Amino acid sequence: MFMMYPHYYGGFSGFGLFPIFLILGVILLIWAIAAHRRDRDDMSDNEKLDHGEETALQILKKRYAKGEITKREFLEMKKDIA
């Protein structure tokens, strides 16, 4: 029987295990993307600051330091933020 149907050797019509590895690879890729997004969304504010993101208070302090807003505006905005 093996000699009559050599194209069935290895299963999947001669492709061997390729379809299984292809499906597993796609599943692994989807899992990795989802895990990366989940980790990025779960970061605390401190971790986000390490990645260059600023808080509203830091931006407000910079604006005050540059002279873009007055002390009164700074204090009002700071009260609104907190």
Image (cartoon, rainbow, N blue to C red):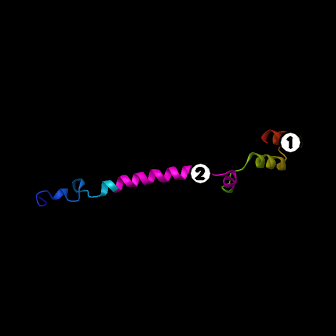
- Pick the quarter of the image with the C terminus: top right
Write down the quadrant of residue 5 in the picture: bottom left
Is residue 10 or residue 71 the one in the foreground? 10
Element carrying mark 1? helix
Residue lying farthest to the right in this orientation? 72
Q: Is residue 40 magenta?
A: yes
Left or right of 9 on screen, residue 72: right
* CA–CA distance in space, label 1 to label 2: 33 Å
Determine which of the numbered discs, if any, sits on residue 40 in the image. 2
Secondary structure that dominates the magenta span = helix
Q: Which residue is mark 1?
A: 75
The segment highlighted magenta reads 21-49
Give neighbour class at mark 1: few <14, some 14-19, many 20+ (Cα, 10 Å).
some
Q: Position of residue 41 (x, y in %)?
A: 60, 48
Numbered tag placed on residue 64 in the rendering: none
Q: Nearer the viewer, mark 1 or mark 2?
A: 2
Q: Position of residue 55 (x, y in %)?
A: 73, 48
For the point 50% across and 51% down, which residue is it?
Answer: 33
Q: Position of residue 6 (x, y in %)?
A: 16, 59
Query: Can you give x and y, in whole percent of width and height, for residue 11 in the image?
Result: 23, 56
Tell me which numbered mark, 1 or 2, is placed earlier along the sequence. Answer: 2
The question of residue 8 being in magenta is answered with no
